[in-house]
Amino acid sequence: MRETLIVAGLFLLAVALRSARSGSLRKLGAVAFLVATFWLGFFFSGSKIGGSVAVSCWFFLPWFELLTHIRRLRLPLNNRLQHRRIPNPASFPNALEASAAMEVEGFDHVSDCGWKWVGMQQFFRFYWHPEERAIAAICLCEQRGVAFAFISITSQDSQGRTWRTTNFPFSLTLQCSPLIRWNYVPCEQNCFKSILLDHRLFLQRNQIGPELLRMPDPDDAEDALEREMRQQVEFNLASGIIRLTGDGHFKYSNRGLFFLWGQFVKDMVRLC
């Protein structure tokens, strides 16, 4: 009976911590889940090995999704953006606030567009600022009834390198070209002014002054995203993360599935 109460108490503590607003407390809640799982395995098996095996099950859980769903995915090689209206603001309450914040900071609206991947829809609203030499975007994603939004700010230097700051909450599902440098900020950081400041500091840390940045072409924002996606696909084909299916699509290779598993585990550990 005592063992049951200990495990139940730890799980309740974990749930409470995971419900907190503080990122540190939420991470502590994740640790509490692992501790509770360890003791559950320990009490059932009577050994520390059993507890360790129980904890490891959390990290191998993504393989169920990888083998039952992602392994069968066929994604188009050439996906094209299409002009779209902004989705229902009720589904993305921060989108209109982010748009207003961008305009306050002097960014001008460029276009609204989106595309569909297998089971997922993405909507983009692009803005640009000539003095900042940057393209900003609000991205709204919806998949299987789950929706989230994030912001990105992108600059490109004279050497063709892309510098991007974003509060995207997950790890990338494809390897990224070394020509694209990412600066991740906490996903709960939704204030555009704060993200813009982080982007400026990101450029300063890498000694990229305004004179080294290319002036973006607002009319090219959509084409630039399509080119970047094609380049990323080509890079991952060369890396063996994905492979062609012969019908204008690609799928994840075995190596790609292990790469995705690593990304899933990284997200589980990061737990922003």
Image: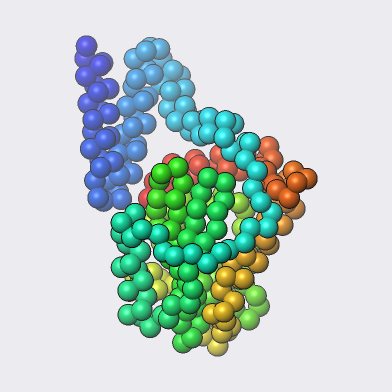
Along the line of sight, the residue nearer the viewer: 43 or 139 = 139
Classify 225 as above or below 133. Answer: above
Q: Eyeballing the image, is 117 above or below 137? A: above
Would you say residue 207 is visible in this rendering?
no
Residue at 50 percent of width and 42 percent of height: 264
Q: How is the image coloured?
A: rainbow
Q: Where does residue 115 sit, x and y in percent of width and height?
A: 55, 58
Residue sitting nearer the eye, 170 or 226: 226
Task: Pick out the residue farthest to the right.
Answer: 246
**Direction from residue 57 to residue 192 in the image, left or right:** left
Q: How many marks?
A: 0
Above or below, comparing residue 177 to residue 134 in the picture: above
Residue 240 percent coordinates (x, y): 72, 47
Residue 43 percent coordinates (x, y)? 34, 14
Q: Residue at x 51, y 85 (%)?
A: 210
The picture places residue 138, in percent across and down from the top left corner, at: 43, 65
Judge from the rendering whether residue 103 lies leftward or rightward of residue 62; answer left or right: left
Is residue 253 shown left or right of residue 269? right
Is residue 140 in view from this perspective? yes
Residue drawn at the location 72% of the way across and 57% of the way down? 234
Which residue lies at the image location 37% right of the left edge and 17% below the top edge? 42
**Quadrant where the N terminus is found in the figure:** top left
Relative height, residue 117 to residue 80 (above, below): above
Q: Is residue 178 left or right of residue 245?
A: left
Q: Nearer the viewer, residue 219 or 1?
A: 219
